[in-house]
Amino acid sequence: MRAFIEAACWFVAGMVFWMATVSAITLAETIVAVCTSVVLSVFAVVARRAMGLRFRPSAAWLRWALLVPVAAAADLGRLFAWIARGARDPVEADAIERRHVPAGDAPEAVGHRAAAIIAVSATPGSCVIDARDDGAFLLHRLVGGPPSLDERVSS
């Protein structure tokens, strides 16, 4: 039953993501979304079990997920402004920074690291380029500013 619930959650996530990114919701797109989401949900459950990951989602992940669209829109605006200025060199925020999240092999720490890296890399202004088991990750940030998602996931 637990695997079915997990697969159903992955299915819903896949459907929402697919339908949110298509230019027009048509019958063909809906069929493709359903088929893709079924495959995604099966692979996600099988992969998680094969890797032995046992973490559970936390409330912090939901806060990050809700903040990702805001951070993405802000980063996109800053990137467009950078392009509009015709700047050839990266803006002042261009940097490689070290951030820290919980370390260790405990399921909660592994889950926190994975969710933090996904959230931070989902915005167009930053990308995690290295992650270590000691909880450190290297972040390449092209633009920065509020809402500073990278600081929120590492706090």
Image (cartoon, rainbow, N blue to C red):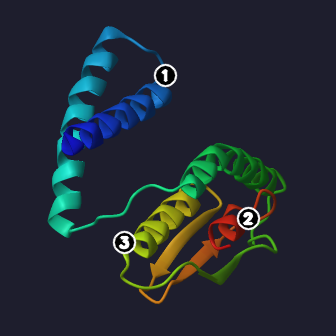
Looking at the image, is 4 positioned above or below residue 65? Answer: above
Q: Earlier in the sequence, mark 3 or mark 1?
A: 1
Q: Position of residue 130 (x, y in %)?
A: 47, 81
Q: Quadrant of residue 16?
A: top left
> Mark 2 packing: few (<14 Cα in 10 Å), some, or many (20+)?
many
Q: Residue at x 81, y 51 (%)?
A: 81
Q: Are marks 2 and 3 in contact (CB under 8 Å)?
A: no
Residue farthest to the front? 1
> Could you tell me how far apart the alpha carbons at marks 3 and 1 are, in whole angstroms?
38 Å
Q: Are marks 3 and 1 in contact (CB under 8 Å)?
A: no
Instruction: Name the side, left or right, on which 92 lies relative to 138.
Output: right
> Mark 1 packing: few (<14 Cα in 10 Å), some, or many (20+)?
few
SS for dot 2: loop
Residue that badge 1 annotates: 23
Q: Quadrant of residue 123?
A: bottom right
Residue toward you, 88 or 99: 99
Q: Earlier in the sequence, mark 2 or mark 3?
A: 3
Amino acid type, label 1: Ser
Residue that badge 3 annotates: 107
Amino acid type, label 2: Val
Q: Quadrant of the N terminus?
A: top left
Amino acid type, label 3: Pro
Q: Residue at x 72, y 74 (%)?
A: 94
Instruction: Name the side, left or right, on which 138 lies relative to 54.
Output: right
Residue toward you, 105 or 77: 105
Residue that badge 2 annotates: 143
> Mark 3 packing: few (<14 Cα in 10 Å), some, or many (20+)?
some
> Could you tell me how far apart the alpha carbons at marks 1 and 2 are, in whole angstroms?
27 Å
Q: Position of residue 50 (x, y in %)?
A: 15, 64
